[in-house]
């Protein structure tokens, strides 16, 4: 990066963009809007529209001397549209997903950037007779976006920034005509989504919907690759300008997920020159956003894997890899049309979603595999005549708990979002708010602790039923006592018994059967919006939450010890060989559990210190994909550095790690997340 961009990067790292936040005005707007939005005569759609209009109007244009792309938040607080009493009344009647707002779906940026808001407004006008009230909410939302762009243009003119004035002369009213206009248009749209109250706003297949603008400018000679890279670097930096204003569980958990590469039609891979430039821009910027997801398949070259591995080397925790040859088939089996399935993206973390035509809720609930297995061992082991009887009880309990989970979501209310609806063309044409549903309305259920569950069942199978070296009462008593007087047994279970990740067919077969039961049971249910339930191998934060409710387990795990993140071996798996892990975790048909959830590997950072190491890691990734793995993320870590960072955080402010499906600054994480990352196995290649 050049000196200009390094200055912007330093401002982002030091949170210096916060100096442009108008805290006094933010407080005034927050209080005024909070009172206004309590008007019970206003519908939720009207409240959302009024809130968006007033927040956008309250924004003050900020144009920095060294910026080529603009928009910086000045208003910090967005009030809820409901009072606590209203929330309580809603919760008594409906299930509220997270905060109740539209989130974690992917807008169709391409359609808006390619048409401009004048054309979109004309479409709304032509359809408004069907629902004139809703049409005016969409139009008012468009007007608020155009207004802020106009005010930025006026400010640019006032301070003599002719380049910015010219950049905003055409967009967002008209379609973008150049690569730079397309990037600025995207920045305006992404800014508007955050201001609308939507959160976890996905970036989607950026290299696909931006490629035509790039290609045109390169071919006509108005843009060089160096110019394009500089613009990309600046756009990537913009993701960190305001990120402290929209964290999820922790700073960095914000959903700014970008997808590169992947099929664009049958057998045709879309990885292109812009895809490479995006990887390079991310490598140069070295910040936690945007989070890069790389779609790969049987056509992906080893050079692409090597380029991506250079990004992993930086310790950013991405790119995350998704295997088209598995994911697309899995989505087709769930009822997605090919034209939609081939266009899939990664959600905020790793869930597979479709842009512009889906109102899927990919993280609505979770099943604890280890919780099921542990409860069944405690309740059923003593009376089980053999292992098959115990495993039958486990399968029955999985089915019972999944029914309970599905029953929780027999009604769902999502707060309307006219702004997000603008990015969903079919909903615009029908004047139907995206919160009411779209072409796809599927729900995703995570599955946590699959490795610990399989390890526990295998331990009982081997030691109690097959080898008969441990009787039932001894096993149950040791678990109940948290192994306090059974150190030898605990060590046998924990360190001397085969586990998932060691390429043991018996253990891996148990995991496959558990996942198969999970998938087949969910396939029987239709959700309250007429959609499917999708099982997945992700964990989100449940790897800590579920662990707190589970006692000691038959794999030698003690009370309070966390589960592994996502689809990964237990934290004390004996193998240090990542290839054996890959073999274990590719023996099941991952197309059946395609909600998403990556195999997560921590590689010691010394692995990446020479060309041979880079080559080995790239080969490891390609081997996982070749074997049918569905999703993979790799962390380059150094346990000693992490321990030092806990002791002296001021020296490690910019140390980045992968948490579960997002990357964050290590020293800003809660201690339990830090400790979990330190506990994970460091593999070598």
Image: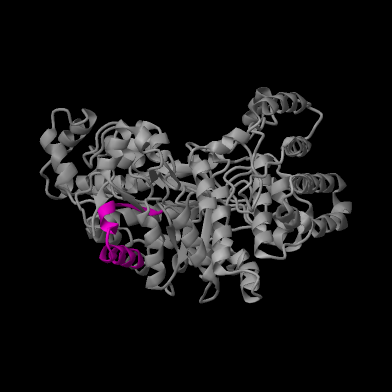
Q: Main secondary structure of the magenta part?
A: helix
Q: Which residues are magenta?
A: 598-622
Between 178 and 323, which is closer to the camera in this rendering? 178
Q: Is residue 458 left or right of residue 79?
A: left
Between 46 and 110, which is closer to the camera in this rendering? 110
* Quadrant showing the C terminus: bottom left
- The quarter holding residue 585 reads bottom left
Residue 264, above or below 599? below
Tell which residue pokes out farthest to the right in this image.
129
The percent position of residue 638, horizontal first and vertical second, equals 28, 46
User: Is residue 192 covered in magenta?
Assistant: no
Residue at 52% in and 59% down? 259
User: Is residue 620 covered in magenta?
Assistant: yes
The percent position of residue 359, horizontal first and vertical second, equals 63, 51
- The quarter holding residue 642 reads top left
Residue 339, above or below 553? below
The percent position of residue 126, horizontal first and vertical second, equals 87, 58
Residue at 68% in and 39% down? 415
**Whether residue 330 is visible:** yes
């Amino acid at each position: 990066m050049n000196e200009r961009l390094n200055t912007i990067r330093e401002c982002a790292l030091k949170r210096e963009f916060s100096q442009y936040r108008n805290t006094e005005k933010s407080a005034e707007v927050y209080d005024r809007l909070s009172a206004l939005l309590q008007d019970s005569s206003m519908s939720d759609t009207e409240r959302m529209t009024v809130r968006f209009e007033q927040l956008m109007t309250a924004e003050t244009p900020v144009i920095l001397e060294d910026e080529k792309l603009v928009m910086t938040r000045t208003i910090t607080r967005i009030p809820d549209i409901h009072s606590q009493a209203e929330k309580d009344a809603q919760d008594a009647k409906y299930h509220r997903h997270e905060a109740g707002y539209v989130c974690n779906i992917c807008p169709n940026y391409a359609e808006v950037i390619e048409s401009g808001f004048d054309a979109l407004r004309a479409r709304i006008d032509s359809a408004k007779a069907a629902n004139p009230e809703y049409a005016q909410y969409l139009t008012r939302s468009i007007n608020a976006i155009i207004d802020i762009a106009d005010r930025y243009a006026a400010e640019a003119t006032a301070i003599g920034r002719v380049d910015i004035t010219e950049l905003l002369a055409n967009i967002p009213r008209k379609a973008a005509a150049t690569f730079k206009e397309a990037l600025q248009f995207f920045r305006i749209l992404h800014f508007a989504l955050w201001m609308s109250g939507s959160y976890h706003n996905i970036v989607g297949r950026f290299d696909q919907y931006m490629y035509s603008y790039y290609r045109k400018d390169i071919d006509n000679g108005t843009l060089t690759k160096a110019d394009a890279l500089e613009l990309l670097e600046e756009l990537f930096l913009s993701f960190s300008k305001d990120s402290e204003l929209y964290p999820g569980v922790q700073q960095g958990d914000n959903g700014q997920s970008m997808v590169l590469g992947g099929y664009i039609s049958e057998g045709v891979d879309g990885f292109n020159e812009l895809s490479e430039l995006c990887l390079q821009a991310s490598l140069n910027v070295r910040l936690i956003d945007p989070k890069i997801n790389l779609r790969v398949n049987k056509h992906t070259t080893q050079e692409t894997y090597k380029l991506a591995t250079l990004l992993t080397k930086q310790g950013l925790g991405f790119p995350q890899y998704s295997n088209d040859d598995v994911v697309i088939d899995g989505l087709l089996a769930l009822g997605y049309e090919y034209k939609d399935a081939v266009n899939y993206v990664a959600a905020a973390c790793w869930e597979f979603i479709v842009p512009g035509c889906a109102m899927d809720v990919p993280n609505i609930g979770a099943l604890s595999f280890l919780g099921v297995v542990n409860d069944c061992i405690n309740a059923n082991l003593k009376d089980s005549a053999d292992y098959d009887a115990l495993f039958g009880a486990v399968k029955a309990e999985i089915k019972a708990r999944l029914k309970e989970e599905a029953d929780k979501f027999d009604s769902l209310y999502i707060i309307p979002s006219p702004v997000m609806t603008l990015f969903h063309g079919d909903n615009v044409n029908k004047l139907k708010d995206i919160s009411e549903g779209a072409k796809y309305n599927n729900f995703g259920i995570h599955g946590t602790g699959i490795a610990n569950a399989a390890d526990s069942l295998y331990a009982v199978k081997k030691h109690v039923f097959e080898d008969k070296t441990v009787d039932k009462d001894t096993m149950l008593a040791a678990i109940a006592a948290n192994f306090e007087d059974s150190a030898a047994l605990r060590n046998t279970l924990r360190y001397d018994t085969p586990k998932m990740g060691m390429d043991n067919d018996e253990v891996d077969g148990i995991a496959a059967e558990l996942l198969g039961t999970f998938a087949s049971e969910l396939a029987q249910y239709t959700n309250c919006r007429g959609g499917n339930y999708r099982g997945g191998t992700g964990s989100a934060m449940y790897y800590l939450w579920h662990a707190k409710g589970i006692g000691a387990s038959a794999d030698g795990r003690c009370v309070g010890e966390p589960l592994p993140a996502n689809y990964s071996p237990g934290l004390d798996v004996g193998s240090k060989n990542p290839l054996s892990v890959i073999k274990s975790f590719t023996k099941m048909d991952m197309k059946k559990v395609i909600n998403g959830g990556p195999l997560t590997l921590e590689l010691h950072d010394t692995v990446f210190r020479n060309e041979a190491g880079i080559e080995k890691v790239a080969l490891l990734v390609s081997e996982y994909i070749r074997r049918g793995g569905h999703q993979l993320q790799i962390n380059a870590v150094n346990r000693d550095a992490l321990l030092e960072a806990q002791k002296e955080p001021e020296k490690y402010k910019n140390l980045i790690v992968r948490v579960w499906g997002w990357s964050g600054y290590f020293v800003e994480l809660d201690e339990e997340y830090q400790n979990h990352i330190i506990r994970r196995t460091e593999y070598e290649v």
